[in-house]
Amino acid sequence: MSKIVNIFVLVLTIVSIVLAFKLYEKREELVDRGDKMGDTINQVAANLDEASGTKLQSVLTKDALGHKQFKNLDKLLPQLAEQSKNIATQKNSLADTMNSLASTLEIEGISDADLKDAIKYQTVAKDLSDKVAKVQARNENILDKIVVMGDVVGVPLDKATLKDVDKAAGEVDKLNNKVVAIKEKSDKLIAGIGAIAKTLELSEPSLSGDDYDSSLASTTSAVVEFKGKYDTTVVNLAKSEENAKGLQEDLNVAKTERDKATAESQKRLVEINKLRKLISNNTGIEITPLEQNNIARLRYVQGEVKSIDSKLGFVVVSVGKYTKAVQKIGKAKNVLNADIPNNCKLTVARSTKQGIQFVAELDVFKVYDECAAANICETPKAGDVQIGDIVFFGREELAKLTSPAEETE
């Protein structure tokens, strides 16, 4: 019996030894596992501490997490959970901020969910960074062009100030005010050019469209052409004034001669009256000199073409209000003022070797003291009027102007 007991005890001892050995192995495995877990937690704490401003790694040390400090785990591990939660919150907040930045910059293709996705984050963040860089490059280019535009319109701008969010508005306002002023001046200039074109009766220019250059060039050319015509007109007017001065001098000379002739005619009239009485006494026939108001005086009017204005198409003849109409009575002369009427017709003739040759007819439109201005009548028989041609009243015109009662001398 004791022998059986001894054997049983021995077996139990052996089993105990085996179980103790197995238990020791498991213990060592658990210790090793705990050490590895402690190392891992320490490393996680280190990663969470990186650039975070926290010092969790110094709290969750390997020794603090070792199997000998097992009782401290309930106190230490919640700090890791809290840190992880804070980091997750920070990550999500950062993702929201990045997504808001993308939306503000109007960058497409960026998702808030992708930014929060740990697997997609790196790719999406790089895409966002590349697109932000492009937006920045675009903005730099725009600022450079704004500065150049400012120089063009005479408003120096500072690029650094344009980048300053608090001062940029002031710089842009300076440029905007200048551009508005230039636009107002441009509108006034366009209106002024249009008014000039209208005044000069030119085609209205289109200076607000794409054909600005061609329209302005066309208007400029038309104005230059108008100026040329104006200058030519001024020169011609100056020549006309010079001719008028010459005609006035001729008129003054003619007036002097007229006054002399008038005095002479008074003397002749006295002689004619004496002669008329003498003839009447001897023959019984009375010869009556024409009075000044007798239109029949026009048959004694004769002059010549003094000047021809080919551009304006009229001639000046040497018969006028005070041109002398000389009625011969025997050896005596009855000198009267021609006083030719407006709107009458004069005949133009030329003395040739073959005799007196008809040239043309003239329409008198203005009578002066010693001359008259007339247009050349366009008729099939009309020839080229020349200076020096003879002018007088033809029979047909005299018949129209003279009544039967006035034809008696």
Image: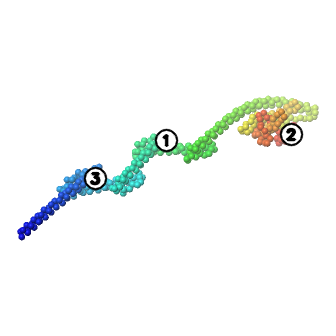
Along the polypeptide, which appears first: circle 3 or circle 2?
3
Residue 123 position within the rendered picture, expressed as x and y whole percent measured from the top left: 36, 53
Foreground residue among 111 and 273? 111
Along the polypeptide, which appears first: circle 2 or circle 1?
1
Residue labelled with disc 3:
48
- 400 to the left or right of 115: right
Residue 29 vertical position relative to residue 192 in the rendered view, above or below: below
Kindly report the distance in space between the C-alpha atoms of the residues bearing marks 3 and 2: 141 Å
- Residue at position x 21%, y 55% in the image: 35
Residue labelled with disc 2:
407
Q: How is the image coloured?
A: rainbow
Residue 46 vertical position relative to residue 222 in the rendered view, above or below: below
Q: Amino acid at mark 1?
A: Val
Foreground residue among 201 and 11? 11
Foreground residue among 235 and 246? 235
Residue 119 position within the rendered picture, expressed as x and y whole percent measured from the top left: 34, 56
Q: Which mark is residue 31?
A: none
Q: Give neighbour class at mark 3: few <14, some 14-19, many 20+ (Cα, 10 Å).
A: many
From the image, state whether disc 3 or disc 2 is nearer to you: 3
Q: Secondary structure at mark 3?
A: helix
User: Can the viewer see residue 116?
Assistant: no
Quadrant containing the C terminus is top right
Residue 364 vertical position relative to residue 12 in the rendered view, above or below: above
Kindly report the distance in space between the C-alpha atoms of the residues bearing marks 1 and 3: 56 Å
Check the image and name the residue furthest to the right. 283
From the image, state whether disc 2 or disc 1 is nearer to you: 1
User: Can the viewer see residue 271?
Assistant: yes
Q: Amino acid at mark 3?
A: Leu
- Residue at position x 57%, y 46% in the image: 211
Along the polypeptide, which appears first: circle 1 or circle 3?
3
Foreground residue among 134 and 357? 134
Whether residues under marks 3 and 2 lie with C-beta atoms below 8 angstroms apart, the answer is no
